[in-house]
Image (spheres, rainbow, N blue to C red):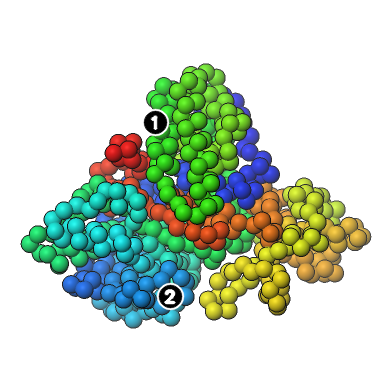
Amino acid sequence: MTGSTIAPRDPRKVMTLARMGSFHQCRLSFMRILLRRLKREGWRFDRPRFDIDARGVGVAVYAAHGPRNSYSLVAFANDLPPEKRSDRVIATEWDATFTLFDGVPGEDDIARLARNIPLQEAGRVSQSELSVSRANRSVRLWDHVVERLSTGRQPDPEMIEDVGYLMRTTAVYGSGKLGAADREWTENRPEFRAPFQIEMLSVYLTRAFVLDLVDHMAKVRAPGKAVSLAPEMRRRLGIGNSTGLGMAPFLINHPVLLHSWIAAREKALARVRALPRIGADAAQALRALAARAHAEVDSWQSAHPLQVEKLARLRADMRALCDHLETADLAGALPLDALYIWGEAQLGIDGQELLVSLMLEPFPDLVDPLAEAMHADEANTTRIDGTMSTARLRAIVEDVYDWALAIDWDDPGAQANVWYTSEEKLEPRLGGREEPGIAAYEQPLCPGRDAARMHRDLAGAPDTSVGAFLMRFPQHRHIARRAQIAARFPYAEIRDNTIGADLLPIDLLRAKLAFFGAGHFDPRSDRWVRINMYRNAPLPAELSQVAADDWSLPALERTMS
């Protein structure tokens, strides 16, 4: 119980692109929510099929059995020529393709899926499939691991540490993509009520398949000499991911869901800050977690100037935090509130947000139940209230979008970018407004500018109802809806210019991926990033015997050995 009340942070502070682009995984990240449930409910795992030939071609099935339902990852392995390997969304072949099947597939199901899943966008699936995904090998590490294992040796630990994954996904599609089951089909199942649990389960089982596949390839190369990858090596390998602009507009297009995610995290922070005292065990845990985070950040590498600069600041912040925790009075009154206030004064934004994640770790009883509130009923919360007065709507705009009303939208730099949809792949893209003809295809992904435009028309219109106003100005329907949503869901709106000259789309990607639970952010430009998923996490076969939620930061002896 808390002895005082501390309010969640102001959306004006939290919902800027710079701060969202500095988020880190935490106890409320979706991978961690999933593994806690799998452990708590005693899910069972098996591998009913593994028919992969000496070339690495074939099919495997990995099944997860819960209290009510079973799900199966159906994996199709391919012998992909090097010249066809690409992380770009326009690729047509991959080293492996996957679907998460609702239940355990029969022979007819697998035959049907074999005709479609390897084709990805060119194929079609049914309501029995919950997700569709694909992955490519990290060739340098893959070849090294197979070669070492086939000669009876373990791979070089430094290479494992440097790369961190044997395959990386280039897309994990769910929610109706390519004909897969819509979200409405599964949202009432307890295991899928939290966001993106289908996708997180798919990636978790994919990791198990990839680790088994590399063992298999070593053994078919040298049947009498090959060894299996050591358990510690297996855990240190996650699944990589390459993510670009296709993901960026998601947070803008799902304001109520965004609010649910941010509100849960901010409520968790407020609960922890309000603790009147913490025990010696919690204080020691916090110090140890900070040291682990410091070591993990020190192990990150990137060649991109943006991330190199951020990493340098974050490393300095982690040194400062660890030094401060050595002498900080964590036995005093409101110790975590004092620690947070210190962080605001002494750390950069990236360091502040990592501190937030660390502060939540020792308090699962306060934090973990908030995962149950991270879903959103988008269908029943986005209807426009036409009876609202225009005076009330104008007041909302002036409160939520005050930052946007201060921008000179006639300045070309304020509208330098255009979000549009690629004709080739029907995915979001970003182009310069000066490009000929591009403005005609602009998507409504700049709420700030649109709110300013609506505010101008509201100022010149007579007092009436929102319904009557929108009959006269129908172009403002989408932003009127957003404003009404933001009035009820304070973290629904990003309080920043999403088309300005200084926009870094990577901030949008990072915010979403942090909620997924990703680690080791490695931007390759300001528009796409590589990350690692489930690195250090227990594997399905060992989940029942080990802790489910002490893997997001590696142990010190591992990172420093």
Left or right of residue 40, residue 251 in this image: right
Does residue 294 lie above or below 481 as drawn? above
> Would you identify the image quadrant in which residue 270 lies?
top right
Mark carried by residue 91? 2
x and y percent of residue 54 in the render?
18, 72
Amino acid type, label 2: Ala
| Lateral position of residue 496 relative to residue 66, left or right | right
Are the two marked residues, 1 and 2, in contact with CB atoms closer than 8 angstroms? no
Q: Residues within 10 Å of mark 2 (few under 14, many from 20)?
A: few
Decide which of tag 1 and tag 2 comes sooner along the chain. 2
The local secondary structure at tag 2 comes to: loop
Question: How far across and down, in percent of the image, does residue 58 sit?
Answer: 24, 74
Task: Check disc 1 and report its element: helix, strand or loop.
Answer: helix
Can you tell which mark lies on residue 288? 1
Rate crowding at label 1 as few (under 14), some (14 to 19) or many (20 or more) other CA atoms within 10 Å. Answer: some
The quadrant where residue 337 appears: top right
Q: Identify whether 109 is placed above or below 49.
A: below
| Residue in the picture at 85% in, 69% down | 472
Percent of width and height locating residue 528: 51, 61
CA gap, disc 1 and disc 2: 44 Å
Amino acid on which disc 1 is placed: Ala
Instruction: Report if residue 335 is visible in the image.
Output: yes
Q: Residue at x 75, y 49 (%)?
A: 403
Instruction: Residue at 29%, 59% (x, y): give it.
Output: 141
